[in-house]
Amino acid sequence: MTYHIKGLDPAPYHHLFGADAETLAAAGAVRVCATHAPGFPDRITLDDARVGQDVLLLPHVSQPANTPFRATHAIYLTEGAEIAFDAKDTLPPAMQRRPQSLRAFDAKGMMRAADIAEGAAIDALIARLFDDPEVTELHAHNARQGCFMARITRA
């Protein structure tokens, strides 16, 4: 099974990079400093921020479909990150470091299956969930905090 994982495009967030507290608050965002690593997984690079690095904590709509599974949760973005993770059949560092809850969605945005895996077992879970031909994409969430990590599509 070949799959593709891509970090978030930074362009829609450029206006928040370096923004003042008032501008961030209007977007429901705050700036925080990474106090430990791993611990602040950036959704653009799909790696953890370095200790002392500024990150933005903001809401992100990970499942926009008008279904009961529409989802919004907090994510971190490293200020100034410009190059999104983009790879086939490769788990990004932030996903390798923490247990992942994978949720399988069909073309209508309805969840068809979900499970949890960690480390090397994530690859096998991706393959198993994509065995269902109705599944169009998987959403990876950090299993402990529940926040969206990345979208996984068939390559």
Image (tube, rainbow, N blue to C red):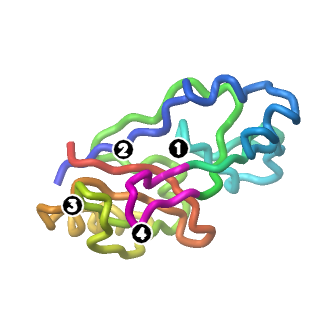
Residue corresponding to mark 1 = 46
Amino acid type of the residue that numbered disc 4 sits on in the rendered structure: Pro
Is disc 1 in contact with disc 4, using a CB cutoff of under 8 Å?
no
Q: Mark 2 to mark 1: distance in Å?
A: 10 Å
Residue corresponding to mark 2 = 5
Neighbour class for label 4 at 10 Å: few (<14), some, many (≥20)?
few
Neighbour class for label 3 at 10 Å: few (<14), some, many (≥20)?
many
Q: Mark 3 to mark 2: distance in Å?
A: 15 Å
Of label 3 and label 4, which has the lower sequence position?
A: 4
Is disc 1 in contact with disc 3, using a CB cutoff of under 8 Å?
no
Q: What is the quadrant of residue 30 in the picture?
A: top right
> On screen, 128 above or below 4?
below
Of label 3 and label 2, which has the lower sequence position?
A: 2
Question: Residue, x 60% and y 58% (percent of image)?
Answer: 73
Q: Dividing the image into 4 quarters, which one contains the N terminus?
A: bottom left
Of label 1 and label 4, which has the lower sequence position?
A: 1
State the extent of the magenta-drawn residues as a range. 61-72
1 or 3: mark nearer the eye: 3
Q: Is residue 96 left or right of residue 1?
A: right
Amino acid type of the residue that numbered disc 3 sits on in the rendered structure: Val
Of label 4 and label 2, which has the lower sequence position?
A: 2
